[in-house]
Image: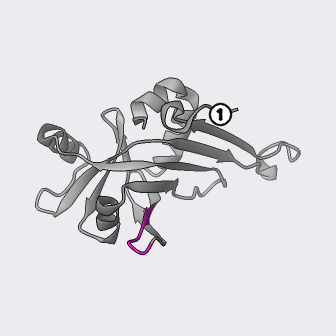
Amino acid sequence: MASWRTFAQAEPELAASVRGLMHQYGPGYGYLATVRADGAPRVHPVSPAIVDGGLFCFLMDSPKRRDLMRDDRYALHTFPAEDCDDEAYFTGRARPVGDRDRIRRLAIALRAEPRADWQLFELSIDLVMLTRRNDPAAGDPAKPTSRQIWRDEVRCGSVQ
């Protein structure tokens, strides 16, 4: 499973575009999908952050946090943009961060409330997909939708 740093080094332009979508309103916004105990999907809004070479998310004690503690698989979708229909999507595994120095640094950097009952998770990346949709008002109406996909070759194998 790749870190954000590994993905960004492999695909810097794709990573910059994805980061732009995630942080288009300043803080990161997205929808986190987890797996409920009965196997059904669960979707929650979250504020992920790309910082310190990783993709992180502080989660309060909640169904989504309990889901990830039981089954670490996740999917993350960026918050919709106001000016276009572009979107980014990630899948991977969420791991609780146990390094107290890293937690403290990121809590300060991300302004996490120190008295809150949160857990920091690092989201490893198996797959990233960026979809750009043509906006006829913004350019060539004949330009098709484009899709870029990156997969962690170690985890997912190479893309043919």
Residue found 59% across the figure and 58% down from its top: 82
141 within the magenta span: no
The part of the chain drawn in magenta is: 33-38
Q: Residue furthest top?
A: 9
Residue found 63% across the figure and 39% down from its top: 149
Quadrant location, the N terminus = top left
Count of numbered tags = 1
Residue found 46% across the figure and 57% down from its top: 30
34 within the magenta span: yes
Quadrant location, the C terminus = top right
Colour scheme used in the picture? one colour
Left/right of residue 29 with respect to residue 104 in the rendered view = right
Q: Nearer the viewer, residue 22 or 130?
A: 130
Q: Is residue 121 above or below residue 31?
A: above
Estimate the x, y position of residue 147 in percent, counting from the top left.
70, 42
Q: Quadrant of residue 74?
A: bottom left
Q: Quadrant of residue 114?
A: bottom left
Q: Is residue 24 above or below residue 62?
A: above
Left/right of residue 2 with respect to residue 138 in the rendered view = left
Left/right of residue 85 with respect to residue 90 in the rendered view = right
Q: Residues within 10 Å of mark 1 (few under 14, many from 20)?
A: few
The residue singled out by tag 1 in the image is 159
Q: Is residue 67 above or below residue 73?
A: below
Element under disc 1: loop
Estimate the x, y position of residue 17 in percent, counting from the top left.
56, 38
Amino acid at pointer 1: Val
Estimate the x, y position of residue 126 in percent, counting from the top left.
49, 42
Estimate the x, y position of residue 64 in percent, counting from the top left.
35, 66
